[in-house]
Amino acid sequence: MNIEKVKNKIESLKNQKLHFKINGSRNQIEEFDGMITELYNYIFVIETDNIKKSFSYSDVLINNIEILC
């Protein structure tokens, strides 16, 4: 998979309720439900309970964040 395929997949999931799993530092895993609300050239924004978090497309590519439908 490459960055363009990741961007296209994320664009197709925009404005849908999704479940996210983030592999954080020190082997901590964070899971939450949210929605992809904004797309930019290098990052996308996830909104959950009025909190916004941004991630790069490469985070998806290297499995730092998993998007579960």
Image (cartoon, rainbow, N blue to C red):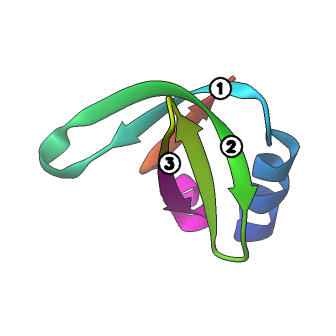
Q: Closer to the N terminus: mark 2 or mark 3?
A: 2
Magenta-tinted stretch: 52-63
Name the quadrant containing residue 19: top right
Question: Which element type, helix, strand or loop, lies under badge 1?
Answer: strand
CA–CA distance between discs 1 and 3? 14 Å
Residue situated in front as seen by the camera: 16 or 69: 16
Percent position of residue 8, x then y: 85, 56
Q: Is residue 68 left or right of residue 13?
A: left
Residue 18 is marked as 1
Dot 1 surroundings within 10 Å: few (below 14), some, or many (20 or more)?
A: some
> What residue lies at 77% left-to-right and 29% top-to-bottom?
16
Question: Which element type, helix, strand or loop, lies under badge 2?
Answer: strand
Residue 52 is marked as 3
The residue that mark 2 highlights is 36
Residue 60: say if magenta: yes
Q: Which amino acid lies under the numbered mark 3 shown in the image of this protein?
A: Lys
Disc 1, disc 3: CB below 8 Å? no
Q: Closer to the N terminus: mark 1 or mark 2?
A: 1
> What residue lies at 80% left-to-right and 68% top-to-bottom?
4
Residue situated in front as seen by the camera: 69 or 63: 69
Percent position of residue 12, x then y: 87, 44
CA–CA distance between discs 1 and 2? 8 Å
Q: Is residue 58 left or right of residue 2?
A: left
Q: Closer to the N terminus: mark 1 or mark 3?
A: 1
Disc 1, disc 2: CB below 8 Å? yes
Q: Which amino acid lies under the numbered mark 2 shown in the image of this protein?
A: Ile
Q: Which amino acid lies under the numbered mark 1 shown in the image of this protein?
A: Leu
Question: Which element type, helix, strand or loop, lies under badge 3?
Answer: strand
Dot 3 surroundings within 10 Å: few (below 14), some, or many (20 or more)?
A: some
Q: Give above or below for 2 relative to 28.
A: below
CA–CA distance between discs 2 and 3? 10 Å
